[in-house]
Structure formats: structure tokens, C-alpha cells
Amino acid sequence: MHGAGNDYVYVDARRLPERDWASLSRAISNRHFGVGSDGLILVMDSDVADLQMRMFNADGSEGEMCGNGIRCFAKYAIERGIVPSSAGSVTIDTLAGVRTVVPHFAGAAVDSARVSMGEPRFRPQDIPVDLDPAISRRAGPIVNYTLQPGDFRLAMTFVSMGNPHAVTFIDQPVEQFPLHNIGPLVERHPIFPRRVNFEIVNVRDDGNLDARVWERGSGETMACGTGACAVGVASRLLGHTGDRVTVNLPGGALTIDWDGAGEVYLEGPAAEVFTGVWDE
């Protein structure tokens, strides 16, 4: 399944024995010797929500949350009758907390969804990012922090959407930026103890942003839901856009709503590509 080209293999693991899911994710995500995906997402039982979502990146690391993945998760659960389509919403337990997904139907199928993504967090220890204590003690978000990966001097805004993000706005067209060279340097920079997702952004106008994402554990992806949320939040903090913005990514457009306080809301497509059996 994919949300704006950000693709995952989904497995209903509710009745399966526990196994090395990290190794399975590495194998199944390989685009030459496996199925090919940005990672593996498991459907599991939950004591606090309708279902639990566990998400593993292509390198086997477990992620806290995936905005594109959770929309497809809801589609999977509804269309397979795991949760009733009449419920109106699906609550999903993630490592970032319980998230609510409101599906949109085209006939009997879910074609898109709106997700309450939680409140953005800005304290360095919540992201986490290791900064000089004098900076960390400042009230408010850390914006335009200078980081120099390779030959690039970038102004970073740090946002947690349940997982860590570093967002930079650049004048160079995002499609020309050497993300495959600079992305790994930012992801694994020493100031990020749990690594980081990295977004580069152009401001098209006050309602549209163009972005590319280097996703922690997966490399460049066609889209990233939490990344689009972080981009929308950072853009509003810096005064580039208002409460509602469209983030245009290589895989498609995602809509972000944030009024400067409270939860961030994400809207975007959800699609099933194929089903199959993993033969071991």
C-alpha cells in the first residue's frame, strides 16, 4: 500500500507468533531481492485503541509514527473488516501515542483519510537534539539553527511529531539539492542522538510548499506524513504560510492544518497496490 508514493508492506500480525520483525522488514523492503518498500507495518491488537500499528523502516529500525502509513493502515483495517466501516473513525495505538483516523470513502473503498497527528513538540530534549545548554534553555521553538553538513550551511528548525525532524528552507530548487549526499550527513549528525528525518523546502506561495524528505532509516522517500506535518509547522512558525498549507512532495500532495496551538491534522490519499504471500 502507499500514501502519496510512501509505500509499505502490511501484515496482519494479530494471530502470528512474535518473530524478528526487524530482519523481516530489511528482507521484505529490499527493492531488488524482496517485495520492495519503505518498510513494514504490522496490524496488532491493542488494549487502548481499536488496533496497534507497529512500523519498521527499511533498515529494520522501528519508527514511532508514520503519517502516510497510518492512513493506509486504516484503509486496510476497514476494507478487511477488522474494524467496522460504519464507525466513522479508527483509533490506532502507535509509539507516538493514540492517533485518530477519519476515512473518506469512494463507494465502498477508502481513498483518503484525515489524521489527528498530535501536538508538535519543540523542546530539544523532546525531539531529541543535543544543543548548547544556553540554547536549550530558551523558551519556544528552536528555529534557524545553523548546521553545516558537508559544504552546505543550513538554517534548521527542529520539530517532533512523535519522531524527530529537522526542516530547512532553501532558495535552491529542491529537485536540484543533492539530498542523497547531504541527507545521510544530517540524519546521523552527532547532535541527533536518535538520528533525524530531514526535510528541504521551497516556499512556492503562502498556500503551497515544495519539499523532499530524507527519512530516517529509509533514505529518500516519495512522501513522508510526519515530515509534511513538520514542514507545515515550521513554515507557520517562520511566517511563510498560514494555518493551512499544501505540501507538494515527489509522490503527491498532502494537506496540513495547524493553527499554531493544539494538534496538527494531515490529509492525504491511501491506495492498495497488490497482495501476495511472502515465501520463506
Image (tube, grey):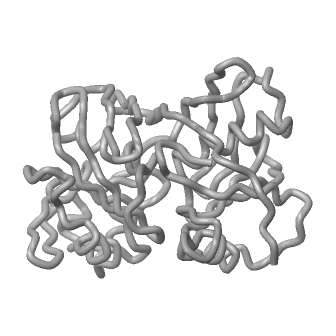
In the figure, 237 relative to 41: above or below? above
The single residue placed furthest to the front in the displayed view is 32
Q: Residue at x 57, y 73 (%)?
A: 30
Quadrant containing the C terminus is: bottom right
In the figure, 39 relative to 139: above or below? below
Q: Residue at x 85, y 40 (%)?
A: 82
The single residue placed furthest to the top in the displayed view is 107
Q: Residue 179: x and y, percent?
A: 25, 66
Q: Residue at x 58, y 65 (%)?
A: 36
Horizontal side of residue 13 vs 173, given as left or right: right
Horizontal side of residue 35 vs 68, given as left or right: right
Horizontal side of residue 1 vs 141, given as left or right: right
Horizontal side of residue 92 vs 223, given as left or right: right
Depth check, front residue: 184 or 168: 184
Q: Residue 63: x and y, percent?
A: 55, 64
Residue 119 seen in render: yes
In the figure, 165 relative to 206: above or below? below
Q: Quadrant of residue 252?
A: top left
Depth check, front residue: 112 or 86: 112
Q: Residue at x 39, y 29 (%)?
A: 257
Q: Count the marks: how many?
A: 0
Q: Residue 140: x and y, percent?
A: 25, 48
Residue 61 seen in render: no
In the figure, 191 relative to 178: above or below? below
Q: Residue 217: x and y, percent?
A: 47, 71
Q: Quadrant of residue 242?
A: top left
